[in-house]
């Protein structure tokens, strides 16, 4: 099992930026895809962005394309989510996650396909 700890959330004005970090530890996960999800108030958890295990491919939900960027450090011990041009509708608890199965060519978008989750970090965007 992988342990994940998110940080970097907070309160920001619309149009501003935040950079979320997810520190990973535990078993090796170098062959597992990783992703960011978010859960807005009163809504279900939704896919935000993903990165393939080999770092060659990234995936984004339509509502964040051109605004958010997912990346990892060289050792893949930390996953980042750079969020620019934030909107009030981006307000949510943001979670990082590791996929259940290794070696997958594409990153899934269903929360049920991810087995390891962080505790979440709150992002609030004011208008």
Image: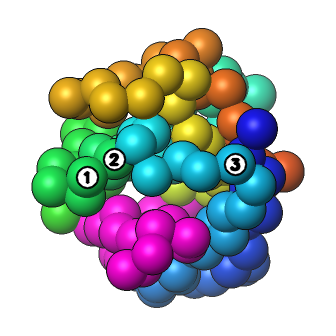
Residue 6 in sight here: yes
**Quick one: SS at disc 3?**
loop
Residue 46, horizontal then vertical, whole percent: 53, 30
Mark 1 highlights which residue? 54
Residue 9, horizontal then vertical, whole percent: 70, 73
Q: Is residue 64 above or below residue 7?
A: above
Q: Are marks 2 and 1 in contact (CB under 8 Å)?
A: yes
What's the residue at 35%, 69% (across, down)? 71
Near mark 1 (Cα within 10 A), the count class, few <14, some 14-19 or many ≥20, is some
What's the residue at 53%, 55% (across, down)? 90
Residue 33 vs residue 14, the one in the foreground: 33
The CA span between labels 1 and 3 is: 17 Å
Mark 3 highlights which residue? 27
Q: Is residue 83 above or below residue 58?
A: below
Write down the quadrant of residue 117 in the picture.
top right
Mark 2 highlights which residue? 53
Q: Is residue 4 left or right of residue 62?
A: right
Q: Of tags 1 and 3, which is closer to the observer?
A: 3
Near mark 2 (Cα within 10 A), the count class, few <14, some 14-19 or many ≥20, is many
Which image quarter holds the N terminus? top right
Looking at the image, tell me whether mark 3 or mark 2 is earlier in sequence order. 3
Looking at the image, tell me whether mark 1 or mark 3 is earlier in sequence order. 3
What's the residue at 76%, 28% (across, down)? 42
What's the residue at 59%, 51% (across, down)? 28
Residue 76 vs residue 107, the one in the foreground: 76
């Amino acid at each position: 099992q992988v342990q994940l700890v998110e940080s970097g959330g907070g309160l920001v004005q619309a149009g501003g930026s935040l950079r979320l970090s997810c520190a990973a530890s535990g078993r090796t996960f170098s062959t597992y895809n990783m992703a960011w999800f978010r859960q807005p108030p009163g809504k279900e958890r939704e896919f935000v962005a993903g990165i393939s295990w080999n770092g060659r491919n990234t995936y984004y939900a339509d509502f964040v394309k051109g605004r958010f960027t997912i990346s990892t450090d060289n050792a893949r011990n930390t996953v980042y989510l750079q969020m620019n041009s934030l909107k009030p509708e981006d307000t949510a608890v943001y979670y990082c996650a590791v996929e259940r199965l290794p070696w997958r060519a594409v990153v899934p978008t269903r929360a049920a396909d991810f087995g390891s989750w962080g505790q979440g970090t709150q992002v609030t965007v004011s208008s």
